[in-house]
Image (cartoon, grey):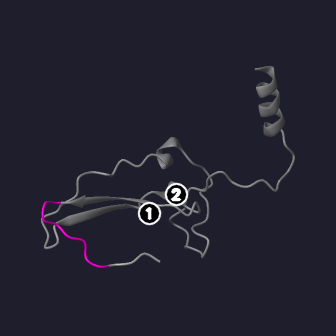
Amino acid sequence: MIFVLFLLTLLSHSTSNASVLDFCVADLSSPQTPSGYPCKSSVTIKDFVFSNFNEGNTSNFFKFSVTPAFVNQFPAVNGLGISAARLDLDIGGVLPMHSHR
């Protein structure tokens, strides 16, 4: 236990400015760059909660709905190279041919 506290204290008092950011919540009011959006200056717990994965409307021709959680909907995934989406596929629904680059 003492060893863990020692390590945490050592890490918290590190003088290196070359550390990598653990997260970079997107500042959506700034322009997007090739590496993503710039980081917000202050973040809250609400930046890390995404609660919009509700059931989608599948009453269209293909009988499916996609709910994205990309950086524009969920700014906490900025710069991580990940995203998420919810796909609702109704009975008899089909996904059109597509690709992901």
Q: Is residue 92 in the magenta section?
A: yes
Q: Label the magenta part by its dominant secondary structure.
A: loop
Q: Is residue 9 in the magenta section?
A: no
Q: Which residue is more in the foreground, 11 or 46? A: 11
**The furthest residue to the right:** 15
Look at 29% across and 79% down and name the residue there. 97
Q: Magenta segment, which residues?
A: 90-97
Mark 1 crowd level (few <14, some 14–19, many ≥20, 10 Å Cα): some
Q: Give amino acid for label 2.
A: Val
Left/right of residue 4 with respect to residue 97 in the rendered view: right
Q: Which residue is more in the foreground, 22 or 89? A: 89
Left/right of residue 74 with respect to residue 32 in the rendered view: left
Q: Which residue is more in the foreground, 41 or 58? A: 58
The residue under label 1 is 70
The quadrant in which residue 30 appears is bottom right
User: Mark 1: which secondary structure?
Assistant: loop
Asked whether the beta carbons under mark 1 and mark 2 sit within 8 Å of each other, the answer is yes
Q: Give amino acid for label 1.
A: Phe
Percent coordinates x, y for residue 62 in the rendering: 17, 72
Mark 2 crowd level (few <14, some 14–19, many ≥20, 10 Å Cα): many
User: Mark 2: which secondary structure?
Assistant: helix
Look at 75% across and 20% down and name the residue there. 1
Q: Is residue 87 above or below residue 1?
A: below
The residue under label 2 is 77
Look at 20% across and 70% down and name the residue there. 94
